[in-house]
């Protein structure tokens, strides 16, 4: 009888340890997944928007069909569709830019949340912060775009596991004035139910095993 009780106590101690470890790692496993691959698997069924059918000109807010771009803070000029530097700085044909170093921040708001979003950015001289938010404004993650993207670089962010999908992306100039260009937006709708995180599944298993152990100890 005594030896059985000792084994049961050790069993519960092990379960408690596993639960703590799983809970501690769950938040990390739910972090946004970042990539510089325009062909990232998360974009396999994505919609491509290349701005080639949009008229050239300035705007403060513009609806592009599945998403809207809003200039949040600027001095003289606003966002623009242009083709002056087509084929350079990671662009192809017409592109979206924040010209003349006067735009401080802008956002991309999706009509329907997405589980993956990618964009090409170029002409970057100074850091920009990119913040990803869900439908209620919770921050999902951030990344910094630095001058390694001067001649064009692709960035992809995708959700993982049970994480909420991306609804809004905010671009903010971190320090000095900068003129940047965007092209080839890709986004994958969040139409499928999220796959449970491994940590969640394991935690459920720990709970079931603990319940079974508790029932066993009561019978002994």
Image (cartoon, grey):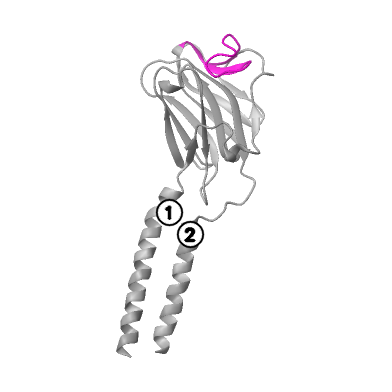
For residue 69: magenta?
Answer: no
Measuring from the top left, give residue 111's x and y in whole percent: 62, 36
**Which SS class for mark 2?**
helix
State yes or no: residue 99 in magenta.
Answer: yes
For the point 67% across and 14% down, the residue is 55
- Contact between marks 1 and 2 (CB within 8 A): the answer is yes
Residue 156 in percent (x, y) is at 52, 34
Residue at image mark 1: 26
How many dots with numbers? Answer: 2
* Secondary element at tag 1: helix
Left or right of 56, for residue 17: left
Residue span colored magenta: 79-100
Asked if residue 56 can be seen in this view, the reply is yes
- Farthest right residue in view: 53
Q: Position of residue 24 (x, y in %)?
A: 37, 55
Against 45, residue 192 (above or below) is below
Viewed as shown, does residue 202 lie left or right of 62?
Answer: left
Q: Is residue 151 above or below residue 43?
A: above
> Is the residue marked by circle 2 packed among few (<14), some (14-19), or many (20+) residues within 10 Å?
some
* Tag 2 residue: 200
Compared to residue 109, the image places residue 206 above or below, namely: below
- Residue at (32% x, 75% y) in the render: 10
Mark positioned earlier in the residue sequence (1 or 2): 1
Q: Which quadrant of the structure image shows residue 37?
A: top right
Q: Residue at x 39, y 84 (%)?
A: 217
Q: Nearer the viewer, residue 133 or 151?
A: 151
Specify the quadrant that holds the N terminus. bottom left
Give the side of residue 5 with respect to residue 83, left or right.
left
In this view, the residue farthest toward the top is 84
């Amino acid at each position: 009888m005594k030896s059985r009780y000792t084994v049961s106590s050790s069993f519960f101690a092990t379960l408690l340890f596993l639960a703590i470890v799983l809970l501690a790692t769950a938040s990390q496993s739910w972090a946004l997944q970042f990539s510089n691959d325009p062909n990232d698997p998360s974009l396999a069924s994505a919609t491509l928007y290349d701005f080639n059918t949009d008229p050239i000109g300035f705007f403060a807010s513009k609806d592009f069909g599945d998403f809207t771009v809003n200039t949040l803070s600027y001095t003289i000029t606003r966002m623009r569709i242009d083709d002056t530097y087509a084929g350079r700085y990671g662009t192809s044909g017409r592109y979206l830019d924040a010209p003349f170093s006067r735009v401080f921040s802008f956002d991309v708001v999706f009509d329907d949340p997405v589980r993956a979003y990618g964009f090409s950015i170029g002409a970057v001289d100074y850091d920009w912060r990119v913040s990803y938010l869900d439908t209620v404004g919770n921050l999902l993650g951030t990344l910094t775009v630095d001058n390694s993207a001067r001649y064009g670089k692709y960035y992809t962010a995708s959700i993982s596991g049970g994480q909420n999908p991306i609804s809004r992306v905010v671009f903010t100039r971190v320090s000095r004035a900068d003129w940047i260009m965007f092209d080839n937006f890709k986004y994958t709708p969040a139409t499928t139910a999220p796959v449970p995180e491994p940590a969640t599944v394991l935690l459920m298993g720990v709970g079931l095993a603990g319940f079974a152990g508790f029932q066993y100890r009561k019978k002994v």
